[in-house]
Amino acid sequence: MNSYYITGIILSHENIGEKDRLITFLTEERGKLRAVARSSRRISSKMAGSLEPFNLVRCWMHTGKTFDIIKNVQLIKTFPNVIKNIDIYITASRMFEFIQVTVQENDESQDMFRLLLGVLTALDRYDSLNSIKVFFWLNVLILSGYRMRLDRCVCGREDVKGFSPSMGGVVCIDCMLKTNDSILISNSALDTLRMYEQIRLSSAVKREIPDTLMKEIDAIIDRFRLCHTNIKLRSEEVTI
Ligand SMILES: [Zn+2]
């Protein structure tokens, strides 16, 4: 029987049968991975407490027929503040749901793992929520193959006035009139998106984005994400 170790963040779990659980991880080594925790719903199970969403764990696995089997779990880190605060919880749930849908199984994605771990750590520290969101969504879209064009219009003009998801990013006034999904973009939103595409998370979390500006940026990112990935997140139904 083949065995191996993984380090992973738990994205979700679901019950199977009477006693078992199917756990979905984003792992450092193998991208998304689904594996079974046998008898983990028994009260006496040592694994149960560790195999909860948002936890970072190291697991000893055996290769199974349909799903691999989790033989041993070591809890490395929990992020307790993420579940204590409703705004942070909803933010994290959307991120987790998107990753669960977009990342493929056995797809090596160390960058995706590092991004999620970094963002989860920042959320747990109560760093600037708006900054973390913008940083995450720009970067997760880039890692998924969807980079916004922010430098100039598709026609080459640098004096951009709008944003068109279907045209892949910013557009000049003439190209804007040729599309039916363009929205106006303010200079502040444009500057912020351009900056957050370049900076590291450690520098993003030190910045603040005012709520009014965030509203505009959120709309741009959501439209772009929906247009290119076609993923409507379940957690988007939740309103505060
Ligand atoms: Zn143009």
Image (tube, rainbow, N blue to C red):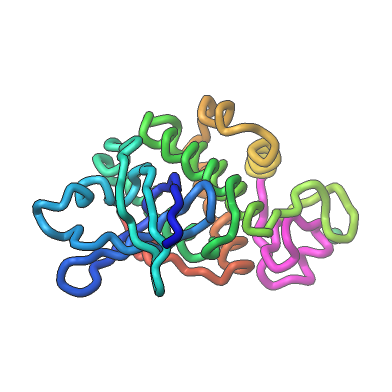
- Whether residue 187 appears in this view of the structure is no
Q: Is residue 117 left or right of residue 124?
A: right
User: Of 205 and 161, which appears nearest the observer?
Assistant: 205
- The quadrant the N terminus occupies is bottom left
Residue at the (44%, 33%) spot, across then down: 122
Residue at the (32%, 47%) spot, across then down: 89
Residue at the (37%, 51%) spot, across then down: 10
Q: In the image, is residue 97 part of the stretch drawn in magenta?
A: no
Q: Which residues are magenta?
A: 163-187
- Whether residue 150 appears in this view of the structure is yes
User: Of 141 and 221, which appears nearest the observer?
Assistant: 141
Q: Is residue 111 left or right of residue 80?
A: right
Q: Is residue 108 left or right of residue 2?
A: right
User: Of 179 and 201, which appears nearest the observer?
Assistant: 201
Q: Position of residue 129 (x, y in %)?
A: 43, 37
User: Of 41 and 64, which appears nearest the observer?
Assistant: 64
> Which picture quadrant has residue 187?
top right
Q: Position of residue 159 (x, y in %)?
A: 83, 48
Q: Position of residue 101 (x, y in %)?
A: 48, 65
> Which picture quadrant has residue 162?
bottom right
